[in-house]
Amino acid sequence: AGLGQTELSTCFPAACTTGSSWNKEILYRMGMAMGEECRYYNVNLILGPAVNIKRNPLCGRNFEYFSEDPLIAGSLGAKLTRGIEDMGVGTSVKHFACNNNEANRYFGDSIVDERAYREIYLKAFEPIIKEGKPQTVMCAYNKVNGKYASENPELLNGVLRDDWGFEGLVMSDWGAVNDRVKGLNAGLDLEMPYSEAGYENLKAAVEEGRVTEEELDKRVDVVLRFIELCEREKEKRKKIRRRKKLASAATEA
């Protein structure tokens, strides 16, 4: 499960607690503290924050969501995201979108009308994308109005990229890809974790013309930009560590 690769780190309060503070400054400072720990361990990306609307008391992820109110969730989520990103560490805002129930989590379909969709469920994400400027967004397991979030062009391209101007990377939740080919055509850049079956299906789709090379190049370019961003940040950290070592050695001398 990768547990042997974990490091000791601060157990920060869950969003169910910080969401009750209504304190944007605290969330920003907490984000900076998270980013500082990530830099210490040379971690490039935090898989969060999670900002879905609390709608169903049976949702097992409610503890990591901020609120049932989109204004609170969006405002606090934007500040936490900005705090982490200002430390040179990426975020992955999740679970996009309408993830409000754990029963039948992998196959459920969130049916929502346009007004509620825009004014409640997407409203929490919008300020985070525009103000927090996360490096990545993580799509949800569930369907949204009949289409899996990982292969929903109206959601990933229409809302996220066209309406909100998001230019970062869209990744799947772990195991949330239903059809890698449909996902790529809908705007999903990265499948997590890597799937040999997904790779083979995608390769066949390109060869058969079901995925254009232009569309594939778009997704590859996004992934490469993210990798380059991470590499640049690593080099910055190395330089900072070297300067600190030289300063310490000079002081001791």
Image (tube, rainbow, N blue to C red):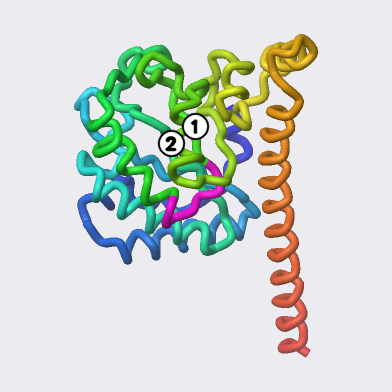
Quadrant of the snapshot with the N terminus: top right
To which residue does mark 2 refer? 159
Quadrant of the snapshot with the C terminus: bottom right
Which residue occupies 52% across, 58% down? 85
| Spot occupied by residue 143 in the image (x, y as percentages of width and height) | 40, 18
Q: Nearer the viewer, residue 64 or 253?
A: 64
Q: Amino acid at mark 2?
A: Val
Above or below, 250 relative to 142? below
Which residue occupies 40% across, 56% down? 80
| Spot occupied by residue 38 in the image (x, y as percentages of width and height) | 57, 55
Which residue occupies 35% across, 12% down? 104
Q: Nearer the viewer, residue 114 or 66?
A: 114
Q: Give the label on residue 3, or none.
A: none
Q: Amino acid at mark 1?
A: Leu
Q: Residues within 10 Å of mark 2 (few under 14, many from 20)?
A: some
To which residue does mark 1 refer? 156
| Spot occupied by residue 51 in the image (x, y as percentages of width and height) | 35, 41
Q: Are marks 1 and 2 in contact (CB under 8 Å)?
A: yes
Is residue 132 part of the magenta span, yes or no? yes
Task: Report the span colored magenta.
Answer: 130-136
| Spot occupied by residue 60 in the image (x, y as percentages of width and height) | 30, 27
Above or below, 46 relative to 100? below
Please identify the quarter of the rendering in which residue 175 is found. top right
Relative horizontal placement of residue 233, taking residue 69 as reference (left or right) = right
Is residue 170 part of the magenta span, yes or no? no
